[in-house]
Image (cartoon, rainbow, N blue to C red):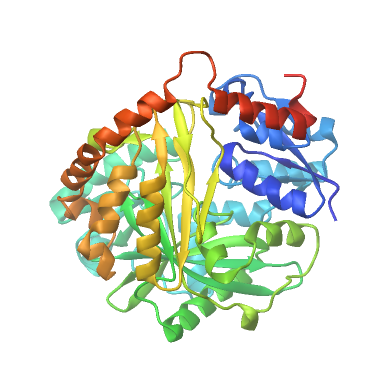
Amino acid sequence: MFRKVLVANRSEIAVRVMRALRELGIRSVAIYSDVDAHAIHTYYADEAYPLEGNSPKDTYLNIKKIMEIARKAQVDAIHPGYGFLAENPSFAYACEKEGIVFVGPSSRVIELMGNKIAARQAMKRAGVPVVPGSDGEITELNEALKIAEEVGYPVIIKAAFGGGGIGMQIVRNAQELEKAMRQATSVALSAFGNPSIFIEKYVANPRHIEFQIIADRYGNVIHLGERECTIQRRHQKILEESPSPVMDESLREKIGAIAVRAAQALGYTNTGTVEFIYSDGHFYFIEMNTRIQVEHPVTEMVTGIDIVREQILVAAGEPLSIKQEEVVIRGHAIECRINAEDPFNNFAPSPGKLLGYRSPGGIGVRVDSGVFTSYTIPPFYDPMISKLVVWGRTREEAIERMQRALYEYIIVGPKTNIPFLKAVLANERFRSGSFTTHFVSEESSLIPEAARILAEELPLQERLQKIFRVESKATAAAVAVQSFLYHHYPAKNEE
């Protein structure tokens, strides 16, 4: 078993990983940028080391700095969390070269799955259904026109090394194709440093469904069921749930077996997510995420399996602690990503100081966060405040519980997407389970409804402003939190 693990991340996911380490009796090491010097993850860890600087490239994306700290702290392993370097094959390779265990798959697999063209080819060889399209990089217009005619318009052009929907271009006829190729190539080069693009059939009325898999070093691979990740804006998820409203046991078993086969074909180890597009009874592989996902808590809530704990144990050479037949899905879970962003300004980030903060609680409610009253959400990183997760015996009960939890959530200071999430949960189309990835753009009533909810709650917000008004550098609540951390977690006492 590991003696000490460095968590190469920040905020709530760093705390999430450290909790699992603490339960396993493993010492944790935090890293932090200048602006994160007093973030909770730096206090929660047994040791904490500065990265110096604030920009991602100078801090949480700086492989050289992180490896120097890993050597200094004499860690056995590094857990990357998600985002930042979690799917960077160079980082995994640096760990392998140093003799430090990377809590994730091998650098070879990360590199393979990071190239969407190579991933498509690997999945086709494994017998996994993929969206009809090009089998390799597209560079010539004539070749693109031929493939588009074969699969039928509309088609979608994607960056081979992309993610988050960046650079994707939907093309509805031959006249649009040349311009779309130029734009996609330009964005791919700018955003990912590689201009490679490919073409796929654009699937109408799609749902985004992903399967959580875990694999050990001994050839054991299991799946933990599916997550419905269809509620998105600009190809970025905002609400996830498990199980999917369209899934039955037979379909779950069928797609789950394919996800397992995909992992086996790669010689995959550790956790991963096999993502599919589902439409009108058909499903197609789109990509594999070689890391823990933001939305992993919904799977933990319905299976009772600590996925991060399994990650760490598998990385330490332990066999999987559960068999496929032991995985049982009970009830329904929903996760809302609580972000510091303004839904009335195209979801622009809204960093700033939390003048007041009170998270919800009660039966079936889980909050993964890294913030507290007087904490300042920095402008350098993702503006996530927390992940709010609820469990209910049925989907209807889970929706009602999430509505109650959002009602209890008090955040004073930065604008948040809570009013928008309330509007989504109240929407009849969402409640019926009949939606696609176009839901947010198609439901024009969401923003007006969010505005109505916000206006209705304005008197409450005004009262909260008085309660939480900050007259000095820190509120009494912040002082209490800092005092608690000081006495219980000595890693940062010198601060």
Q: Quarter-wise, where is residue 185 in the image?
A: top left
Placement of 269 over or under 187, stated as above or below: below
Q: How many marks?
A: 0
View extreme (bottom): residue:
250
**x and y percentages locating residue 452 in the rendered image:** 18, 43
Placement of 99 over or under 310, stated as above or below: above
Q: Residue at x 27, y 54 (%)?
A: 424
Q: Is residue 8 left or right of residue 136?
A: right
Q: Is residue 47 left or right of residue 260?
A: right
- Quadrant of the rendering where the N terminus is positioned: bottom right
Q: Is residue 101 left or right of residue 244?
A: right
Q: Residue at x 81, y 48 (%)?
A: 26
Q: Quarter-wise, where is residue 245 in the image?
A: bottom left
**Could you say which is closer to the camera, residue 369 or residue 5?**
369
**x and y percentages locating residue 227 in the rendered image:** 45, 65
Q: Is residue 137 visible?
A: yes
Placement of 461 over or under 439, stated as above or below: above
**Could you say which is closer to the camera, residue 366 or residue 147?**
366
Q: Is residue 234 visible?
A: no
- Quadrant of the rendering where the C terminus is positioned: top right
**x and y percentages locating residue 331 in the rendered image:** 47, 73
**x and y percentages locating residue 457 in the rendered image:** 26, 39
Q: Residue at x 85, y 37 (%)?
A: 74
